[in-house]
Image (cartoon, grey):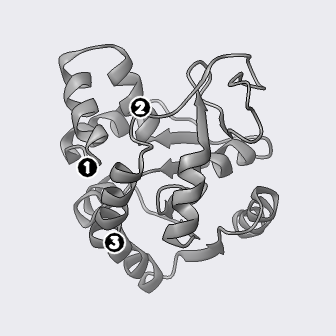
Amino acid sequence: MNIVLLGIQGSGKGTLVQDLSKHLDFLLVSVGSSLRDEIATGSKLGKLIKSKMDKGELVDTNIVMDTINKKLSDNKKSIVIFDGFPRSREQADELDKICNVDLAIYLNLKKEDALKRIMNRLTCSKCGNITTRVKCPDLVCPVCNGKLTVRSDDTPEVANKRFEQYRLETEPLIKRYRESGVLVEIDASKTPNEVLKAVMKVIK
C-alpha cells in the first residue's frame, strides 16, 4: 500500500508518522528529512537545498526524485508512506510513474492554527523527534536526550510564504486524489491521539 500524506505545514504530518510507527511496519519516505540530511553534510547540493528551504521555496523535482528513488530502491516493506511529497502536479506526475497511490490522507487544518503550531514546534537535532516548547521547555529531547532546536524554516515569514505556495501548488492535489477515489480527509485540529485513531481506521 502506497500512502501519501497531504496537509499544510504544521498540520501534524510528522507527528502522525511518529505515532503510526508504534503500530505499523512501513517504509517512510520523508522528503524533508532526506533533504535536511543532505544539508547536514555541508555539500554544495546541501547548501543549495538549504538556500531554497530557508526561503520557503520548493526544491527542484529532479533532486527530490533522486532522494525518493534511493529510498525505494531496496524496499521490502508492504506499506510505504510519503511524507511531504508530492507537493505539486509535476511531482504527482513523477510519483505516478514509479507507483500507484492507494491512499491519500489529507490532514485539514486552518492556516492560523498551523502557524501557532509552527511557532511552538521543536525538532531533535539527534533523532528527529518532533515536540513542543510547552512539553519540553528545557530543550532536551524526551526520546534520546538530544538537543531540541527550531528548524531554520520555522519562521512566520517563511511559513506564510509556504502557506501561499501550498495553496497554489499542493491544494490542487486534494482535488486530484479526491476525484481518483483515494482521498480521505482528517480533521487535523483534533489531538494527535484522535488523529491517529482516525487514520488507523482508514489504513486497516
Q: Position of residue 175 (x, y in %)?
A: 40, 82
Count of labels in the image:
3
Mark drawn on residue 34: 2
Disc 3 residue crowd, few under 14, some 14–19, many 20+, Cα 10 Å:
few
Disc 2 residue crowd, few under 14, some 14–19, many 20+, Cα 10 Å:
some
Disc 1 residue crowd, few under 14, some 14–19, many 20+, Cα 10 Å:
some
Q: Report the front residue among 59 and 125.
A: 125
Q: Quadrant of residue 201?
A: bottom right
Which secondary structure lies at badge 2? Answer: helix
Which secondary structure lies at badge 3? Answer: helix
Q: Position of residue 182 (x, y in %)?
A: 52, 75
Q: Is residue 20 left or right of residue 99?
A: right
Q: Position of residue 163 (x, y in %)?
A: 37, 63
For residue 77, say whether it is visible. no
Q: Position of residue 192 (x, y in %)?
A: 75, 57
Mark 2 vs mark 1, foreground winner is 1
Q: Which residue is mark 1?
A: 58
